[in-house]
Image (cartoon, rainbow, N blue to C red):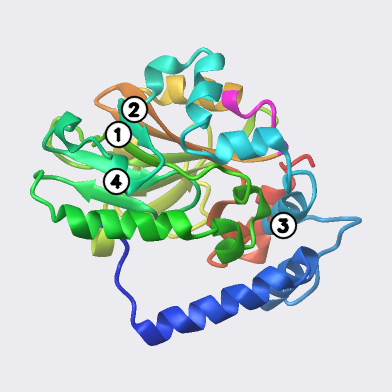
Amino acid sequence: MIYEIGVSIKTKKYKNIKNCIKSILPSKFVSNMVFLKNRHRLIDYKNPVMMDEKLLILKDGVYRNNPLIVKCTDKNQVRQYIADKGYENILINNYGVYDSADDIEWEKFPEKYVLKCNHGSGYNIIVKDGNINKDEVKKKLAGWLKEDYAVISGEKHYHKIPRKIIAEEFIENKAGELPNDYKFFASRGNIFAILIVSGRGKKKQRIYVDDKFEDLGYVQSQGDYKEMKPESFDRMLEIARELSKDFPFVRVDLYDMDGKVVFGELTFTPHGCNHDYLSDEVQTCMGKNIII
């Protein structure tokens, strides 16, 4: 079983205080402080050029209370959006959706499965052997359901998501490994970068490629990235372009399961609009592709 890394009570109290302060301050003020910290200037609302700059403007503007953004951010409701687009076949098997941890139908699940909350990021419990402490898991899930991720993150579109617990399929390839994560950065159907995340923990690697699967040089690559090209890459491109057409910006997360495309999620404010590991030059290069 895997879920969030434990933190000290002191650290949690500090985070709670910090988040409470963030939640009562104007969103634009908080966004400007985040941007200033990393880019050493305030957001230029008249002539934004960097990716995070444009994402912060969208976060505080047209995405803030947008019903479609809320629906597609919701890890439960987004399934209907994907189905309506004609891609129901890429959805992970869903075992159940619950309003409370007490409602979970444990007997319906196979030995391996995933429990997650639909209203934020990091609310995941991975069960690999079916041998879990149900009381502990229920307590963890109940605690997550009480959290307003909009307060924690400052991303207000999370606030209107009706909080649920989702039980779904645990995905792994034929070798019994977690599949690579392919994150398509797109604006109105145009894919301008693909972040590949492979491995977990200390072995975690990431690289940015273009739609020809060439290294963009945004981060230092490790090993032969060409080996990471999935069998379903062309199909992934088609799906990501279609799913992104309705939005000024969205990151479409997909997996390749031995040649089959599997949907992950749609993310509108990735990394909290704070890709601090990317240089100003890279941020500007990516930002020019986002039409807000």
Q: Which of the marked residues, 4 or 1, is nearer the chain's N terminus?
A: 4
Q: Which of the marked residues, 2 or 1, is nearer the chain's N terminus?
A: 2
Instruction: Read off the residue under disc 1.
Output: 168
Q: Which residue is painted at 72% across and 66% down in the image?
A: 31
Q: Which mark is residue 92?
A: 2
The local secondary structure at tag 2 comes to: loop
- Which of discs 3 and 4 lies nearer the camera? The answer is 4
Categorize mark 4 by other alpha carbons within 10 Å: few (<14), some (14-19), many (20+).
few
Q: Inspect this view and state whether residue 82 appears.
A: yes
Q: Which mark is residue 56?
A: 3
How far apart, in angstroms, are the residues tagged by discs 2 and 1? 7 Å
**Residue 283, image x, y percentages:** 66, 57
Chain part drawn in magenta: 243-248
- Which of discs 3 and 2 lies nearer the camera? The answer is 2
76, above or below 90, in the image:
below
Q: Which mark is residue 102?
A: 4
How far apart, in angstroms, are the residues tagged by discs 3 and 4? 37 Å
